[in-house]
């Protein structure tokens, strides 16, 4: 697992403390946000602070699974690094 | 602290919590990350407490506080923002920013601030309040360009300034310093417009972290230091007295020594607030005497006690000063321009904060003054603060004249013209009593400390009493020096807290406290919630002497026994309803 992936797991784990790492990696935010409306706001704030990437809740919902969010952040991250 | 660390910190369970710390968080916006950061900083400060934060309804600060008024006293944080004074001062309400609307907005903000202030004062009568006035920038609603303040903007700021002034004067309201917040969190980086619109949470994560950190500092209410020991040469003044003489030393701008003048002025301010200031200097005593008598000294010689001026080690001077003051080294700060002297004193007193005076460095001296203010900071100056130095001088005189034999002690106390002023009430506003209970170590029944909420809650019990004693004799006043707290039922007094300042030892005040309780509460027996602590030797000695060594884990004394065993008491007694 990449360091980037681990950081995203930490973000998810702090918002959903009852979930194990395996459950997080297999999760889909659409289901998770349905269960806890504040979770989306907190996860977006965490991604902003931890990855320096501004995303909307709607972006995460469109992406859905953890794996897709991770890949999206990685792409955005490398794009922003190449722009600098 | 960032949001991830805050959340991860809160995930960790509190192992064997010692107590519950309940806090009400009152704000008009959704508390979201504020609640998280506040809980996390509180966890850092109180790692053994279980923290519980309750919040009110979104968008209705006044209503939430109204409802809180009906509950029992609860420690409360209140964060007021512009929209709480009038929704049009925020950005979520679209009520109009036309020129014609502005006077009404100002007037409505004034009325709302008065309502809020009244309500917060009522809440503060029951429990401590920690609060902040608006921290966000005002929206661009006034007609002037950004660089120019509009009169209405000034009016709104004046309303908030009056609001903060009126509340900060309340004994149980702690108002967050806007200047300190400005240093930690620049104004331009506080407002998160997108979060405000999409979630109702107006702060950036950086700002909310700073706010929560400062509020926690207010809640923590650390004990101020009590004494400062300072060097003279290149510290109180610029120059070496022994080399350049009394007229050569400087503390003015012309002598390029203004920072030393500022330091003197600052020490004068500390002394006037009851901080003990002493001198430890390797110098010629006669020369120092002349220097301190110079008419342009900003710090009066009378505010310095004791003066340890000789050529012996600084640590020896410090030891003697601390003994005279009768306080612990951890309550003292030592300042000297010589790193070697600072190291020598620190080696002898590792608990003491020892600081090198940064001579010649303007910014570092400025930072030192701010650091010292933080270490000695207190909300108000009590009558005891004002007379503290006088009573220590008196104590010093008393020690040199107190006889050792019991017969001699009787004679001495008889001639001391001592007056004890007792106040028997359950006055929860007695800040000095609260302070004494929370700082006294030696004559302390059990070492129990109280939070403001515990204190208020205890005294709300109809069976509770609070006895305070103030003392004065011909050597000078000592102020309020003893506190007894407990409950009475069926002619039996249960004492749960009893402290007496070490400055009041050897005057039989403790005996008179018990005599007074027996008489005034019509008690037949007094039971003490005693607990041995590493530092309460004097109260152990008191029980050992009074009860002739025969006492168990819960000592008690009956009225008849006490009358037979108590020594002669010569004090004149004054009773007051509330002091």
Image (cartoon, rainbow, N blue to C red):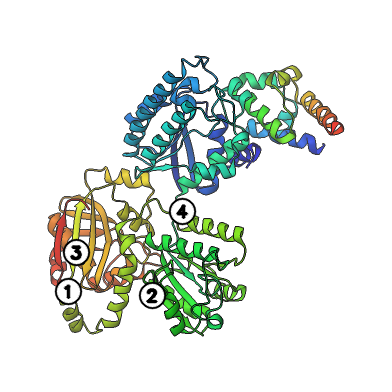
Let me know if marks 4 and 2 both belong to one chain. yes
In percent of width and height, residue B540 lies at: 32, 69
Q: Check disc 3 and report the residue beneath it.
A: B420
**Pointer 1: residues within 10 angstroms few (<14), some, or many (20+)?**
some
The alpha-carbon separation of the residues under discs 3 and 1 comes to 16 Å
- Chain bearing tag 1 is B
Q: Check disc 1 and report the residue beneath it.
A: B567
- Chain bearing tag 4 is B
Q: Check disc 4 and report the residue beneath it.
A: B222
Between tags 1 and 4, which lies in front? Answer: 4
Q: Do labels 3 and 1 touch, CB within 8 Å?
A: no
The alpha-carbon separation of the residues under discs 1 and 2 comes to 27 Å
Q: Which mark is first along the chain, 4 or 3?
A: 4
- Depicted B135 relative to depicted B553: above or below: above
Query: Which numbered dot is residue B142?
Result: none
Q: Which mark is first along the chain, 1 or 3?
A: 3
Q: Check disc 2 and report the residue beneath it.
A: B324
Between tags 3 and 1, which lies in front? Answer: 3
In percent of width and height, residue B261 lies at: 50, 64
Let me know if marks 3 and 1 both belong to one chain. yes
Q: Which mark is first along the chain, 4 or 1?
A: 4
Residue found at the far right of this picture: A82
Q: Which mark is first along the chain, 2 or 4?
A: 4
The alpha-carbon separation of the residues under discs 2 and 3 comes to 24 Å
In percent of width and height, residue B97 lies at: 51, 17
Q: Which mark is first along the chain, 2 or 1?
A: 2
Q: Which mark is first along the chain, 3 or 2?
A: 2
The alpha-carbon separation of the residues under discs 3 and 4 comes to 31 Å
- Chain bearing tag 2 is B
Residue in the foreground of this view, choosing between B393 and A29 = B393
């Amino acid at each position: 697992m990449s360091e980037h992936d681990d950081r995203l797991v930490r973000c998810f784990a702090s918002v959903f403390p009852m979930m194990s790492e395996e459950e997080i990696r297999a999760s889909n935010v659409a289901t998770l946000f349905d269960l806890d409306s504040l979770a989306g706001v907190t996860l977006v704030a965490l991604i902003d602070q931890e990855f320096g990437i501004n995303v909307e809740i709607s972006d995460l919902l469109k992406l859905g699974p953890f794996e897709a969010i991770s890949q999206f952040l990685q792409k955005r991250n490398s794009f922003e690094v190449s722009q600098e | 602290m960032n949001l991830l660390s805050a959340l991860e910190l809160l995930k960790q369970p509190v192992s064997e919590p010692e107590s519950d710390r309940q806090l009400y968080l009152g704000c008009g916006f959704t508390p979201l990350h504020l609640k998280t950061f506040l809980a996390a900083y509180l966890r850092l400060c109180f790692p053994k407490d279980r923290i519980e934060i309750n919040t009110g309804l979104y968008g209705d600060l006044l209503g939430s506080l109204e409802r809180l008024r009906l509950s029992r006293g609860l420690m409360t944080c209140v964060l007021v923002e512009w929209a709480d004074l009038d929704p049009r001062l925020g950005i979520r309400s679209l009520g109009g920013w036309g020129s014609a609307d502005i006077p009404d907005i100002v007037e409505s903000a004034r009325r709302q601030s008065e309502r809020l202030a009244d309500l917060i004062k009522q809440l503060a009568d029951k429990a401590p309040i920690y609060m902040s006035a608006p921290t966000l920038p005002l929206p661009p609603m006034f007609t002037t360009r950004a660089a120019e303040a509009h009169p209405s903007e000034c009016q709104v700021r004046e309303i908030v300034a009056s609001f903060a002034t009126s509340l900060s004067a309340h004994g149980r309201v702690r108002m967050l310093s806007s200047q300190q917040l400005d240093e930690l969190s620049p104004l331009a980086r506080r407002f998160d417009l997108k979060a405000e619109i999409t979630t109702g949470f107006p702060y950036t994560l950086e700002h909310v972290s700073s706010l929560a950190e400062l509020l926690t500092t207010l809640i923590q209410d650390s004990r101020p230091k009590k004494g400062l020991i300072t060097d003279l040469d290149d510290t109180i003044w610029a120059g070496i007295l022994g080399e350049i003489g009394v007229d050569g030393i400087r503390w003015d701008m012309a002598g390029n020594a203004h920072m030393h003048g500022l330091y003197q002025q600052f020490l004068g301010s500390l002394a006037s607030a009851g901080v003990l200031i002493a001198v430890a200097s390797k110098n010629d005593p006669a020369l120092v005497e002349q220097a301190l008598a110079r008419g342009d000294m900003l710090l009066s010689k009378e505010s310095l006690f004791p003066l340890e001026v000789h050529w012996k080690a600084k640590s020896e001077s410090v030891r003697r000063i601390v003994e005279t003051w009768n306080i612990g080294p951890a309550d003292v700060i030592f300042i000297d321009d010589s790193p070697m002297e600072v190291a020598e004193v620190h080696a002898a007193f590792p608990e003491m904060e020892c600081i090198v005076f940064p001579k010649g460095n303007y910014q570092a001296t400025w930072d030192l003054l701010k650091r010292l203010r933080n270490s000695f900071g207190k909300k108000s100056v009590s009558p005891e603060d004002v007379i503290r130095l006088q009573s220590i001088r008196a104590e010093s005189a008393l020690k040199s004249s107190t006889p050792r034999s019991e017969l001699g002690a009787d004679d001495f106390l008889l001639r001391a013209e001592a007056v004890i002023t007792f106040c028997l009430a359950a006055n929860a506003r007695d800040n000095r009593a609260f302070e004494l209970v929370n700082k006294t170590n030696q004559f302390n029944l059990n070492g129990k400390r109280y939070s403001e909420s515990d204190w208020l809650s205890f005294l709300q019990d109809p069976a509770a009493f609070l006895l305070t004693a103030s003392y004065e004799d011909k050597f000078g006043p000592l102020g309020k020096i003893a506190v007894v707290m407990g409950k009475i039922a069926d002619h039996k007094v249960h004492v749960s807290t009893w402290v007496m300042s070490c400055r009041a030892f050897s005057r039989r005040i403790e005996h008179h406290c018990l005599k007074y309780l027996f008489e005034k509460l019509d008690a037949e027996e007094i039971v003490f919630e005693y607990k041995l602590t590493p530092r309460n030797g004097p109260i152990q000695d008191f029980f050992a002497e009074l009860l002739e060594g025969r006492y168990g884990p819960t000592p008690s004394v009956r009225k008849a026994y006490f009358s037979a065993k108590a020594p002669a008491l010569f004090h004149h007694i004054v009773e007051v309803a509330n002091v």
